[in-house]
Amino acid sequence: MVTRVLAEGQARAFESSDANLAAEADFLTLCWAKPTLPSMKQVFVSQNLIEVEMRKERLEQAGIRCMIKNQRSSSLAGEIPFVEIFPELWVLQEQDYDQARQLLEEETDLLPSNQDFWTCSGCGERHEGQFGVCWKCGQEKPSS
């Protein structure tokens, strides 16, 4: 049982063996903690939840606290824009962002060279070939 303070004078207990629920509990703690809100930063997004979970595991092995946002949002497909429900990997502390990006880029460098990637001309974000629109700024993939 994990007890987290949600607001001044209030506490809530979370009974969970699920690591994501524990991360969500930490997130709630950070959101309600005074005097500042969390400085979370998004480090990865994919339409494939397994890819996001693999990268989350890699960051956690390196000691970087992170969480997956939109992990259970696939049921909303069709109700809201599809790019809004893609699983996203967020680091909980802004100071971990650069190290997390470096670890994830090293992992990308180890992928087979036949992988198709493109870089957004609007914001510089790197995307896998199957994506036709930049998740970050909405710019369309350039035609080849």
Image (cartoon, rainbow, N blue to C red):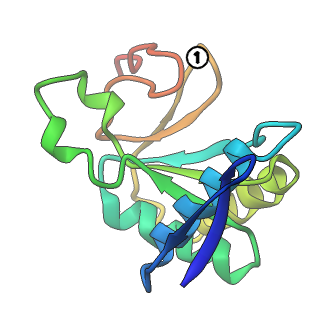
x, y percent for residue 8: 75, 46
Residue located 27% across and 53% down the image = 72
Residue located 10% across and 27% down the image = 78
Q: Is residue 2 left or right of residue 35?
A: left
Q: Is residue 108 visible?
A: no
Q: Is residue 112 above or below residue 115?
A: below
Mark 1 lies on residue: 121
Residue located 70% across and 67% down the image = 65
Residue 99 or residue 93, whichever sits in front: 93
Image quarter in which the N terminus is found: bottom right
Residue 139 or residue 14, whichever sits in front: 14
Residue located 32% across and 29% down the image = 83
Image quarter in which the C terminus is found: top left
Q: Is residue 66 visible?
A: yes
Q: Is residue 5 left or right of residue 49?
A: right
Give the amino acid type for the residue marked by disc 1 in the picture.
Ser
x, y percent for residue 68: 48, 56
Q: Is residue 36 above or below residue 70?
A: above
Q: Give the residue furthest to the front.
A: 9
Say which quarter of the image contains residue 140. Answer: top left
